[in-house]
Image (cartoon, rainbow, N blue to C red):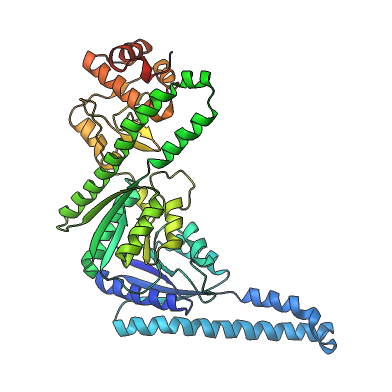
């Protein structure tokens, strides 16, 4: 799992927790540990220059100042290097005592920058760093170095807040590839440290209700009629809220299936509300020693360094946190690519609400399938035909409100397959609209 582990060291209590946890992982996974400390001599040199104007008169001569600068630079560089080596000696001695393979790495420069650069180029499987460092005060929750490294490093990161891994691990599941990689990581940690696993999934229908209430306040009577507001609201309540619950329950069922495949039983908990708020309440109640979640979630877009839920939990959760990195975003081996933008498998033509894909049963009931791991296999493997849309037909459905567009397109596809159409044209869209869904589901076109 983790064969090459980077440990950030600064001689703080959290740093010592990192060393201990790294050694525990190395013993169980036969990992190679790299302990690294970064010191910044240039910072002290700059500070000395800033203070020169305040020195007594006898030190203001340029020759004297030059000599003092050289002396200060030499002493600072030597002193910081000796101190840094002493920090690494603590790491080395613990590793030798535990008989784990290791090496020490001493870097000079800005700490977060040098750590991030080394992790990116060093092909490490895991980065372990303390949530806080030597400069922490009572009100600190996450140190600046920790936060900056998390936003830059792409590998899995174990953020250490205490040195215990015992009792329970909680894994947050939202249907993203990273969350299912988190489930697999939870299984490994549970087996290594004899932990029980709680998989939690939180869906948030409340935001959409608030959005509808906000829309109602600003829509004119004429706009409300065009938008068919009351019909949309009813559809939302009947399909979206219930659909979200089914989607997230399916994610939990899939997590349980993954665990059963490894012979491990897990507890699954479905909650509704603001995800980070519900998860933090659960953590405070259950007191796990480890929380596992993706660096980003189902709403991830290109360039996002950390998701909002993850960022809040990073600050608020009192336990250790394992962030699953970008390597989890690799597509499943079952995933397929289609070069023709008009050829859309069922995987893509499903109900898209806040980035969640919701396929429909033939009887109109909602079902949810993990889109990256199962849906493509289900639709193609069972002989379902791919659906071809004309550009005009796709353009026509673009006028449908986004939160039901996926449902409508899915219904149109089902109609086309049932009637034997090989291509979905504007005419087919109109027939499906009139025959299956009724005009209330669509704008007049």
Horizontal side of residue 48 vs 143, given as left or right: right
Horizontal side of residue 67 vs 396, given as left or right: right
Camera-nearest residue between 342 and 431: 431
Q: Vertically, is 394 above or below 284?
A: above
At which x and y percent is residue 5? 37, 68
Identify the residue shown where x is 46% and y is 56%.
311
Identify the residue shown where x is 29% and y is 22%.
411
- Quarter of the image for residue 390 reads top left
Horizontal side of residue 95 vs 445, given as left or right: left
At which x and y percent is residue 328? 35, 51
Camera-nearest residue between 257 and 272: 272
- Quarter of the image for residue 266 reads bottom left
Q: Residue furthest bottom?
A: 58
Camera-nearest residue between 410 and 212: 212
Q: Quadrant of the C terminus?
A: top left
> How many numbered discs?
0
Q: Quadrant of the N terminus?
A: bottom left
At which x and y percent is residue 122? 43, 63
- Quarter of the image for residue 42 reads bottom right
Q: Vertically, is 241 above or below 261?
A: above
Residue 53 appears in the rendering = yes
């Amino acid at each position: 799992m983790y064969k090459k582990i980077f440990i950030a060291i600064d001689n703080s209590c959290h740093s010592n927790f990192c060393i201990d946890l790294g050694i525990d992982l190395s013993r169980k996974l036969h990992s190679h540990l790299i302990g690294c400390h970064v010191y910044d001599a240039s910072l002290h040199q700059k500070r000395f220059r800033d203070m020169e104007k305040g020195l007594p008169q006898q030190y203001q001569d340029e020759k004297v100042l030059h000599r003092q600068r050289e002396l200060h630079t030499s002493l600072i560089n030597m002193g910081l290097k000796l101190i840094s080596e002493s920090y690494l000696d603590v790491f080395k001695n613990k590793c030798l005592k535990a008989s784990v393979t290791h090496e020490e790495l001493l870097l000079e420069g800005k700490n977060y920058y040098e750590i991030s650069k080394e992790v990116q180029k060093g092909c490490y499987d895991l980065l372990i760093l303390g949530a806080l460092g030597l400069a922490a005060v009572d009100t600190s929750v996450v140190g600046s170095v920790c936060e900056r490294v998390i936003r830059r490093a792409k590998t899995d990161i174990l953020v250490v807040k205490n040195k215990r891994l015992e009792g329970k691990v909680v894994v947050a599941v939202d249907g993203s590839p990273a969350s299912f990689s988190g489930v697999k990581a939870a299984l490994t940690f549970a087996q290594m440290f004899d932990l029980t696993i709680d998989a939690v999934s939180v869906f948030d229908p409340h935001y959409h209700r608030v959005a509808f209430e906000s829309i109602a306040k600003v829509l004119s009577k004429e706009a409300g009629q065009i938008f068919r507001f009351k019909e949309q609201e009813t559809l939302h309540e009947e399909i979206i809220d219930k659909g979200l619950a089914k989607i997230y329950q399916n994610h939990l069922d899939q997590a349980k299936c993954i665990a059963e495949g490894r012979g491990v039983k897990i507890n699954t908990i479905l909650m509704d509300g603001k995800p980070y708020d519900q998860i933090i309440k659960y953590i405070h109640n259950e007191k796990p020693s480890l929380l596992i979640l993706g660096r980003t979630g189902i709403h991830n877009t290109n360039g996002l360094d950390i998701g909002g839920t993850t960022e809040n939990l990073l600050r608020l959760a009192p336990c250790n946190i394992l962030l699953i990195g970008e390597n989890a975003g690799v597509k499943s081996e079952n995933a397929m690519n289609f070069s023709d933008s008009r050829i859309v498998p069922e995987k893509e033509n499903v109900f898209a609400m806040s980035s969640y894909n919701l396929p429909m049963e033939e009887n109109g009931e909602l079902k949810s399938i993990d889109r990256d791991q199962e849906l493509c296999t289900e639709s193609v493997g069972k002989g379902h035909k791919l659906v071809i849309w004309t550009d005009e037909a796709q353009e026509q459905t673009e006028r449908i409100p986004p939160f039901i567009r996926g449902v409508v397109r899915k219904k149109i596809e089902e109609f086309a397959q049932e009637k034997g159409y090989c291509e979905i044209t504007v005419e087919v869209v109109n027939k499906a609209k009139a025959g299956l869904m009724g005009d209330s589901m669509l704008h007049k076109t």
